[in-house]
Image (tube, helix red, strand yellow):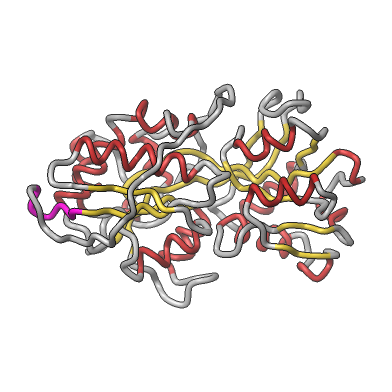
Amino acid sequence: MSLKPRWLRFAAIPLALGMFGAACGGGPQGGAGGDVPRFVSIATGGTGGAYYPIGGAMGSLLGREIDGLQNATAEATGGSVENIRLLHDGQAEMAIAQGDAVHQGCNGEGDFEEPQNIATIALMYVNLLQITYPADRGINRFEDLAGKRVSVGDAGSATEVFMRQITEFKGMSYDDFAEAQRLPFDDQVTAMRNNQLDVGTWVVAPGVSSIQDLASSEQIQIMEFSEEDLKALSEKYPYYFPAEVEGGTYQGLDEPVTVPGTWNSVVVSKDLGEDFVYQVTKALHENVDALAKGHPAAGDLAPENIENALCPLHPGAMRYFEEQGVEVPEDMRPTS
C-alpha cells in the first residue's frame, strides 16, 4: 500500500469559524432521507488546530447538501484518540482522526483494548510532526529534549500518541524530560511565551494558526529528523512516512524541514446507514473547495487518497468509490 501523499502548497491564511448550535447525539433516527439522522456530532480537536475549523466547514456543507439532516455540529475535543472512543461509545457519528490512532483503534492496539466501532470514508491530508521551540533553547536533535520542559500534546490526542511512539523509538521515555506536560496547542504557545515551557508538540497540517502565532513573537525552530531515522520509523510504524515542512511556512523559517508525517482520515460509526454515509462521502469529495474554507489543508482531499486507508471502509463509502472507479485495497474493503 502506497503512503505517498499529495503535497500541500498553500499560504497560511487567517481562520474564521462561525458558531455552531449545540449538538445532540444523532444516530440513525430517521427523517426525510430514510436512514439520515436528524443530528450529527462531528468530533474534531482543539480550537488551535486544523480539525476544528475543518469540522465546522464539514458540518455546514452537510447541512446544506443532505435532506433531512437538521444539524451537523463540530465539537471541540482532546483529539483523535478521544474522537475514536466517542464514535465507539455512540457519543459522535463522525470524526476526523490521525492515521496512527485510526490504525490502533481499528485493530484494538495501543490506547484501545478492543477494536473500535469505526469505518473510513475519506482521507484528507497529511499531518506533520512539528516539535517546535524558541531557537534559543539549545535544541538540535531529539536527544536534546532530555532535561527540558516538554508538552507532549493534549491528553487523548493523536499528537500525544505520536510523541509517545517517537520518544520510545529514540530509546527515551517521558521521565527523561524535566516535565512532560499535556497541553492543548494554544496553551503551549502561552506557556512558551511565559517561559513555563521549553518545547511544544504539534502533529498538524503545516501553517497551523497556533504555530503561526508563536512565530509572530519568537524566532522558532522545528526539529528535523534524519533520513536514517525516518526510514527506521516507517519500518516500525507503517502509518508514518517521510514528509516536509516547506520553507516559508512560518515566519523566520526559510528552509524546508524534514519530519515524519501521517494521513488524516474521516471516520464514522459503523452503525450509520449505508445510504446516509454514501451521501456524506459524495458531498465531501465533490465540495472540496467548501471544506478548504475551514482550513486550506482540507483542499488536499481527493478520492485517490483512499488507497492509503488504515481501517476498512464503510459500505456507503465503498459504493461511492466504486462509482468513481477508484481502486480500494482488498484489505480495506468493508468487513461486514
**Most extreme residue toward the bottom, as rendered?**
113
**Which of the 4 image quadrants contains residue 254?**
top right
Q: Is residue 36 magenta?
A: yes
Above-or-below relation of 68 to 171: above
Considering the whole magenta stretch, tell me its main secondary structure: loop
Residue beneath the point at 30% across and 61% down: 269
Residue beneath the point at 44% across and 36% down: 17
**Residue segment shown in magenta:** 33-38
Quarter of the image with the C terminus in it: bottom left
**Which of the 4 image quadrants contains residue 280?**
top left
State left or right for residue 137 relative to residue 307: right
Figure label count: 0
State left or right for residue 222 relative to residue 119: right
Residue 232 pos. (x, y %): 69, 53
Residue 127 pos. (x, y %): 56, 43
Residue 143 or residue 214, whichever sits in front: 214
Residue 165 in view: yes
Residue 116 or residue 327, whichever sits in front: 116
Q: Is residue 147 magenta?
A: no
Residue 187 or residue 28, whichever sits in front: 187
Residue 276 pos. (x, y %): 17, 49
Residue 236 in view: no
Above-or-below relation of 15 to 33: above
Residue beneath the point at 18% across and 37% down: 323
Above-or-below relation of 285 to 31: above
